[in-house]
Image (spheres, grey):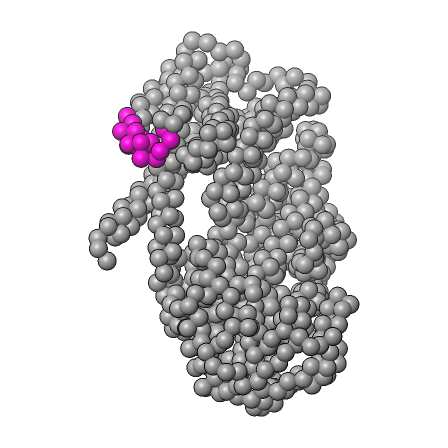
Amino acid sequence: MDFSANHVGFVIASYALTFLCLAGLIIATLGRDRKLRAQVERLDTQRRKPR
Amino acid sequence: MQFLANPTRFLRIANAVLPYVWAITVALFAVGLYGALVTAPPDYQQGETVRIMYVHVPAAWMALFVYTVMALASAVAAIFRHPLADVAAKTAAPIGAVFCFLSLATGSLWGKPMWGAWWVWDARLTSMFVLMLLYIGYMAIWAAIEEPHRAAMVARVVALVGFINIPIVKFSVDWWNSLHQPASVFRMDGPTIAGPMLWPLLVMGLAYTFLFLALHLTAMRAEIAARKIRQIHIAEIGER
Amino acid sequence: MNLILALIRRDLTLTLRQGGGVGTALGFFLCVVVLLPIGIGPDQALLARIAPGALWISLLLSVLLSADRIYQQDYEDGSLDIMTMGPVPFEMVALAKSVAHWLSTSLPLAIAAPILGFLVNLEPEAILPLAIAMVVGSIALSLIASIGAAVTVGLRRGGLLVSILVLPLYVPVLIFGLSASQPNAAPGLTAASLLILGAIALVSLVVSPLASAAALRSYLK
Amino acid sequence: MELSAQDLTCERGGRIVFRSVSLSLKPGQLMQLTGPNGSGKSSLLRLIAGLNESQTGSVTLAGGSEDLSIGQQAHYVAHQEPVKGALSVFENLAFWRDFLGGGDVDEALEAFNLSRLSSYPAGLLSAGQKRRLALARLVLVPRVLWLLDEPTVGLDTASLARLVGVMAAQLDQGGMIIAATHVPLGREPDVRLDLGGAP
């Protein structure tokens, strides 16, 4: 990849934007998954122990 | 189809498979990016900007692929009354929408050096734009209807109707485009490509597909947990 | 005063939590924007010429069609009845709900529209004047939409009727909004149109609560 | 302090619902409003609450505060439940506290045994629970006059007992209640008004 070619800024921008969007999506998905499963864990243990 | 029906079996499989899927995704991306940025030669016409193709084309493929997955899941949900299929369709939509947005954004970034404008109503970009609206409509239906069961039934119809319309929109936009613009000299996926330029594209396509698989399984796991929480809340409220 | 803030805050949380309020208005706006080049053709020069007008009309329609959300829900579940029995005149309730609709729908759109202008090839230097004019205009748009929503709140299929009632009132907003967003018009023209647009907004700030409250009371009878 | 109305007439959709109705209610008194469906019970309550106007006669709250209308000194609980599903039980009442001016949400929730549900989205509540949430508004903001339209609908025995208790407290503190209902309210009404007879 020759970084001095013209319009190379657009290539970098495309890859940067792709990285940002995909990273954001991964973090959001994993975050929601961890949060909700932890909540289910907490609710299950809460309900199983005798009130 | 009954095999995947109950969530617990699905969760067991998902938990087992996910680490490997993530590993494959990372490996594919490494190879793909290396191929796209290093080994692939610059295009004699467009120079380095052709490398945008390696993030644009897979995103476009995935935008269409994910909507197909949503339509299939909705069909399965409608025919076999599969609650898990609805979950699959609902969780796939945001991921598909991000791929669709990426294909539009990278398409625009690719178009600027080529056409001098950030956005041109080229046939491919216009169809992709309409697909984006289909995604927004589908997600809006889920957001608008509170009760999950009714929302699921309505969303199935929206996904299937949307899916039937994709080829119709594609055909009419291509016809409309040829009406207004002479066949655009510039083809979005580059002149017929082969060899060192082609394999990185296929690898990147695979990488995107595995990324979708990993994200989709994770998102479904989260949605199953969310629904379980809602049930627990309803049960707790019902007790008094 | 904190009663008004409480009402605005509640309406905003309701819009955000329920049905992605801003998302649907933005989705509608994008739909209108995509129809234009398909109808008119993708010719860049032509699109550039009509861009400000097209964006204004898209904004106007988006605000109009999200208007029935202002009172519909509170009318159906009886909240409006109780709101007439609050310590503050009912006109203030109507004003608070219009402000909530403005903040949740019209303002975000008025800011997003110029940014999305590149879809219809809006020249970069036209973005700022258009944004300023749209923000001022959106106040009038929301307040007038509130009248339309109040007048049709009890009707079964009020949607179409609200358009016929409200669109004529939008004509002055569109005319002065457009002339306020021309970047290279005669120097005095843009400023003057912006002032008149502001005046329209102020007039509707007074008229809208009165008219909306009166219309709503008649439906509560 | 006395609520009095003379010669009220209510017309709805061209039909005379009731004519020349008069009533008077003193602090600490419970009025029971009865009559067949469509005899204008709701219309009368809405008329007193200021939502409706009478063609003839007038309604006055002698001794009430001068600058507030009757509606601003009254609670009106109708068939619909002004409960927003997307907000939590607590948020629903907190809004009414801010809007109607003050009051303790937890105490109101406790009065109708809803404290345990305070953080749940109201959309998950059953009809009976939503009913209790609507009634909790009575305890939340103290107002002299209560206008209740079929308050016992959807309540189980435990909740009914709570409602009767809350009403008794209101009457003991010199409040006035008009209840349109056929269900006994735990005490003999001081005043009865039957709209059945009206043409």
Q: Residue C65 at x, y = what percent?
A: 65, 49
Asked whether residue B211 is in view, the answer is no
For the point 47% across and 44% down, the residue is B148
Q: Where D129 falls versus D197 (above or below)?
A: above
Total labels: the figure holds 0
Q: Write the residue at 60% across / 59% down.
A: C76
D62 sits left or right of D156 in the view: right
Can you say which quadrant of the picture contains the C terminus of chain B? bottom left
Name of the residue lying farthest toward the top? B195
Residue C105 is left or right of residue D184, and the answer is right
Q: Position of residue D37 (x, y in %)?
A: 64, 67
Is residue D67 found left or right of D198 in the rendered image?
Answer: left
Question: Based on the displayed image, in which of its 4 quarters is residue B170 positioned?
Answer: top right
Q: Is residue B14 magenta?
A: yes
User: What are the residue bounds of the magenta stretch?
Assistant: B4-20
Q: Quadrant of residue D22?
A: bottom right
Residue C147 position, x and y percent, is 69, 60
